[in-house]
Image: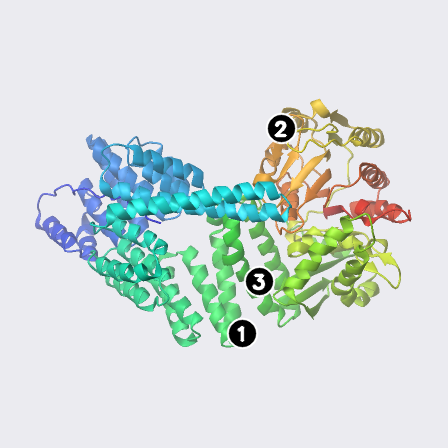
């Protein structure tokens, strides 16, 4: 990304004494550290030019936080002196630095104070970093429409506009793939067509930028050349690459020049000399941020070459540089890289230490990660998830009790990171853990945690007495995941009993290895904390052919995202509030004719207030929840959880309710004890779909949620839900209440798991 807008302007001339002249001379000779050394004793003086020189020097040496401070001071002093134009330029510099430091929201807030034409380009940069590509494109187009804008800001806007087109094209392509998984072929094709059009616009924009930049040697001109390079034919690319290198060498040393060398490196199959040049330049500037990036990338290069000695050396240099800046967004990457290298050379203890440090660094940047674009979830699976899984793999290679406990805690943190990534906030930060393990022992509940790692399936069992057990099985990862998808599809197919094959397969994989230990403990219920796509399938439908019974017939079964997501229920006070939608409403336009009867029967059983069809509106839901403070909220309506917040929703009469907005509608005094979503549906093949369902309940303050993996026939849904509430009213736990309701369905020989296995209880 080309951040530079060339906001640099002629520095205000500083009168004597001689020190100021020395500072100017040092700056003009690109001796930025000497400039800083000379002017630092004078930083308390009310002279904005001192701060301008300090800001520009810090910026060129990669010390962006110090640069921000001094641009801020310069702007404040110019404002008080009545120099509005220079104050405005200082403000733009602050906003641009905020973008570069990964604080785009702060940049947007600063830009609200600016009416300068250059502000549109900086605004586009902030939106681009935030992943708001469509708004970024609009901002860049406005920036380019201004007359009289200098060539450098225009080039910067063109470069970044091309990147925004490319990123949006990739987003639509990925969404098309997700829609195709959901059998939404028509919408997938439309998005693919849009993606192709955006790629064409990206190419055209890059070409315009390059044509404008061919006779110019500046950072933005060279960035235009780097952006155009991939579009050239193989023959043209070699000459252009050499030309770009020559022009790069003619640039004055700066943090921006280091970044340009780093941008060039991925475009060649021989990046080593490019990265070494970047590292040498960064060292000459004492640019710690540039040193961290260049040394880290060199470490990654040598890791790919299996030259682990050099890889480790450069990776350690990258970490040292990142430490000096407390740049945890870089540090976690290099610690992870060190862990991989240690693993490759069989230094297992060192690898565990490096992975632990990487996971700890991730914890420090949780707010920044959560505030990033929701589209980063695609990067999450490449850049964040492997750190958790890598450490889990190392710990479970030596499954001592301590390592098993650490694995469970780490798995909880992984689930939390996934939730924050999905919902793009840290609303899950203060998770309760009210001595939950002690509570599980008191309630005699066995905990089972299946973890899928590469080609191994690990099972962790915690028995009510507190003992830990571990089993591991070799699997073909791709085959295992495909079987999960097939099993869910078979369970939904009411026309045959094909599901039995995979129900038995997963019984043998997920439960049978632990069965003897579990039976000896005589637990009252089984709590599963599932990994990946296992969240999307009902483990109540595990089937033992010998006994011809489902797991739910042996024990109540419920699930959770992790131990830290569990809050033990208090004695349930029945204060229900019921909403139902039986008539078709857009976008689904599918009726649920028995919803009226479902709501009426539950109201007869439990009491409370009920609202149907045209009375089920978003304002009515928000108002009645706040006024009645229910303990049970029952929503009988279409719900869709796809793993993308943009396509996940609940249906009210007047509008759809975005999943990430539901919590704001359910603000109340006491937390909900139970949220029931009786007609929801989750994605077949998306790891995030049930995370969305569970996360919705947690955000809404609900201790537990009763939902469905797929839409159930109206009459069967009515029976299961009514029996569940009747059982609950008799005084049994929620897990037991659901088990009894499902067993009653199983006892009917005509019933298929489609009509009872879909129901899942998440939470206590």
Classify residue 444 by image quadrant. bottom right
For marks 2 and 3 on the same chain, the one whose residue lies earlier in the sequence: 3
Q: Is residue 626 above or below residue 132?
A: above
Nearer the camera: disc 1 or disc 2:
2
For marks 1 and 2 on the same chain, the one whose residue lies earlier in the sequence: 1
Q: Position of residue 487 (x, y in %)?
A: 74, 55
Q: Residue at x 27, y 41 (%)?
A: 154
Q: Position of residue 722 (x, y in %)?
A: 83, 37
Q: Is residue 675 visible?
A: no
Disc 2 packing (10 Å; few <14; some 14–19; many ≥20): some
Q: Nearer the viewer, residue 425 or 542?
A: 542
For marks 1 and 3 on the same chain, the one whose residue lies earlier in the sequence: 1
Q: Is residue 210 above or below residue 263?
A: above
Residues under labels 2 and 3: Cα distance?
Answer: 40 Å
Disc 2 target residue:
655
Relative to 98, 541 lies left or right: right
Nearer the camera: disc 2 or disc 3:
2
Disc 1 packing (10 Å; few <14; some 14–19; many ≥20): some
Disc 1 target residue:
348
Q: Is residue 112 above or below residue 490?
A: above
Disc 3 target residue:
389
């Amino acid at each position: 990304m080309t951040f530079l807008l060339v906001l640099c302007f002629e520095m205000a001339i500083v009168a004597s004494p001689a020190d100021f002249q020395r500072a100017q001379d040092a700056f003009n000779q690109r001796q930025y550290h000497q400039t800083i050394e000379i002017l630092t004793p004078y930083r308390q003086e009310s002279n904005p030019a001192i701060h301008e020189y300090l800001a520009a020097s810090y910026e060129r040496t990669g010390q962006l936080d110090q640069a921000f401070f001094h641009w801020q001071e310069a702007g404040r002093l110019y404002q008080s002196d009545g120099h509005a134009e220079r104050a405005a330029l200082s403000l733009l510099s602050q906003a641009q630095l905020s973008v570069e430091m990964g604080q785009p929201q702060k940049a947007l807030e600063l830009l609200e104070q600016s009416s300068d034409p250059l502000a549109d380009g900086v605004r586009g940069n902030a939106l681009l970093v935030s992943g708001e590509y469509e708004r970024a494109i609009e901002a860049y187009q406005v920036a380019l429409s201004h007359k009289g804008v200098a060539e450098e800001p225009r080039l910067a806007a063109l470069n970044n506009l091309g990147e925004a087109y490319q990123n949006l094209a990739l987003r639509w392509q990925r969404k098309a793939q997700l829609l195709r998984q959901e059998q939404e072929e028509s919408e997938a094709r439309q998005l693919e067509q849009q993606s192709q059009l955006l790629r064409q616009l990206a190419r055209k924009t890059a070409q315009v930028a390059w044509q404008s930049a061919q006779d110019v040697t500046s950072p933005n001109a060279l960035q235009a050349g780097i952006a155009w390079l991939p579009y050239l034919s193989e023959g043209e690319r070699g000459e252009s690459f050499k030309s770009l290198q020559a022009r790069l060498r003619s640039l004055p040393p700066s943090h921006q020049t280091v970044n340009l060398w780093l941008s060039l490196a991925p475009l060649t199959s021989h990046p080593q000399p490019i990265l070494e040049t970047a590292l040498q330049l960064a060292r000459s500037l004492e640019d710690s941020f540039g040193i961290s990036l260049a040394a880290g990338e060199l470490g990654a290069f040598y890791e790919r070459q299996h030259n682990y000695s050099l890889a480790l050396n450069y990776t350690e240099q990258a970490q040292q540089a990142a430490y000096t800046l407390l740049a945890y967004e870089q540090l976690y990457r290099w610690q992870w890289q060190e862990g991989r290298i240690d693993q490759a050379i069989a230094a297992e203890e060192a690898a565990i230490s490096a992975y632990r440090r990487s996971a700890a660094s991730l914890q420090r940047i949780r707010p920044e990660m959560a505030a990033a674009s929701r589209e980063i979830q695609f990067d999450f699976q490449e850049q964040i998830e492997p750190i958790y899984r890598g450490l889990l793999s190392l710990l479970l290679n030596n499954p001592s009790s301590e390592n098993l406990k650490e694995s469970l805690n780490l798995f909880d943190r992984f689930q939390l990171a996934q939730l924050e990534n999905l919902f793009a906030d840290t609303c899950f930060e203060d998770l309760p853990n009210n001595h939950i393990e002690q509570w599980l022992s008191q309630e005699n509940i066995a905990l089972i945690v299946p973890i899928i790692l590469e080609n191994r399936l690990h099972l962790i069992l915690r028995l009510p007495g507190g003992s830990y057990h571990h089993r591991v099985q070799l699997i073909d990862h791709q085959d295992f995941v495909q079987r999960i998808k097939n099993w869910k599809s078979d369970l939904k197919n009411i026309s045959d009993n094909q599901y039995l094959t995979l129900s038995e397969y997963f019984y043998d994989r997920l439960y049978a290895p632990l069965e003897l230990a579990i039976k000896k403990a005589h637990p009252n219920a089984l709590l599963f904390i599932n990994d990946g796509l296992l969240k999307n399938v009902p483990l109540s439908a595990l089937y033992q052919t010998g006994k011809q019974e489902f797991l739910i017939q042996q024990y109540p079964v419920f699930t959770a995202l992790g131990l830290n997501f569990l809050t033990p229920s208090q004695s349930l006070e029945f204060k229900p509030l019921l909403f139902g939608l039986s008539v078709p409403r857009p976008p689904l336009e599918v009726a649920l004719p028995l919803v009226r009867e479902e709501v009426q029967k539950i109201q007869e059983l439990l009491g409370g207030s009920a609202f149907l069809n045209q009375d089920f509106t978003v304002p009515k839901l928000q108002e009645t929840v706040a006024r009645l403070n229910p303990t049970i909220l029952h929503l009988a309506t279409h719900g869709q959880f796809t793993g993308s917040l943009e396509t996940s929703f609940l249906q009210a009469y007047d509008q759809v309710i975005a999943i990430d907005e539901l919590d704001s509608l359910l603000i109340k005094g006491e937390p909900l004890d139970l949220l029931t979503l009786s007609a929801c549906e989750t994605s077949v093949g998306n790891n995030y779909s049930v995370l969305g369902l569970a996360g919705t309940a947690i955000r809404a303050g609900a201790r537990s949620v009763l939902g469905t993996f797929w839409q159930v026939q109206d009459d069967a849904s009515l029976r299961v839900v009514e029996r569940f509430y009747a059982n609950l009213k008799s005084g049994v736990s929620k897990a037991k209440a659901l088990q009894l309701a499902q067993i009653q369905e199983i006892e009917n020989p005509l019933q298929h798991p489609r009509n009872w296995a879909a129901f899942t209880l998440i939470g206590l």
